[in-house]
Image (spheres, grey):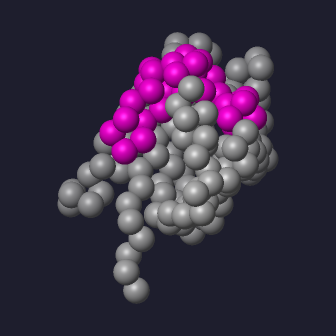
Amino acid sequence: MDAGNSWRSCTLAALVGVIGCGDGGGEAARSDVAIDAEALRAEVLALEDEMNLAVDALDCDGGLAATGVAADPLFVANGNVVRTKADLAAMCEQMVAPRTGAVFTPDSRTAHLISDDGAVVVREGTYEIDFRDGTSAEMYLVMTSVWTRGDDGWKMVHLHESSRPLAED
């Protein structure tokens, strides 16, 4: 495996471990339940979009509304680790305080079902941030989120973000 793909394999292996797979941890397989994979993917992508649009609009409460509380770590961004939802809310407020807004323009966006009740979403594209001081920043952002579905619906239980400068043309 080349070095460029090794982080993807390691990340995917870790993500599968977070949400589980197979027969639901020893419970009987749900063969009697017909799932509509496309509908589940669309549902998770809609929640993902809602979460990201809220944070980009400086609404951390709205952005964290679909966040679960069970994962540890909950959020990893460029080496920074946040372990609780309360810490993530505080970090979000700090992050958006100097901003007037942000826009994420995806180059790609996919949702993969790991099981009937688990999904991984990968988004990558250009992220533009406008600041209160009149400056702006632009970067290439890759986000991977893990979602689980319980009695209270889909919840994001892990988010990993990495960014890099945009390539020079």
Q: Quadrant of residue 1?
A: bottom left
Viewer-proximal residue, 54 or 37? 54
Q: Is residue 132 above or below residue 68?
A: below
Extreme-front residue of the structure: 133
147 or 73, which is in the foreground?
Answer: 73
Farthest bottom residue in view: 169
Q: Position of residue 152 (x, y in %)?
A: 77, 20
Q: Is residue 8 in view from this perspective? A: yes
Whether the magenta-drawn stretch holds residue 76 is answered as yes
- Closer to the camera, 92 or 79? 92
Residue at 52 percent across and 22 percent down: it is 87
Residue found 50% across the figure and 46% down from its top = 144
**Residue 138 drawn at (x, y percent):** 50, 66
The percent coordinates of residue 164 (x first, y second) are 38, 60
Tally of marks: 0
Please identify the residue farthest to the top as the structure is shown.
26
Question: Which residue range is magenta in the image?
Answer: 60-89
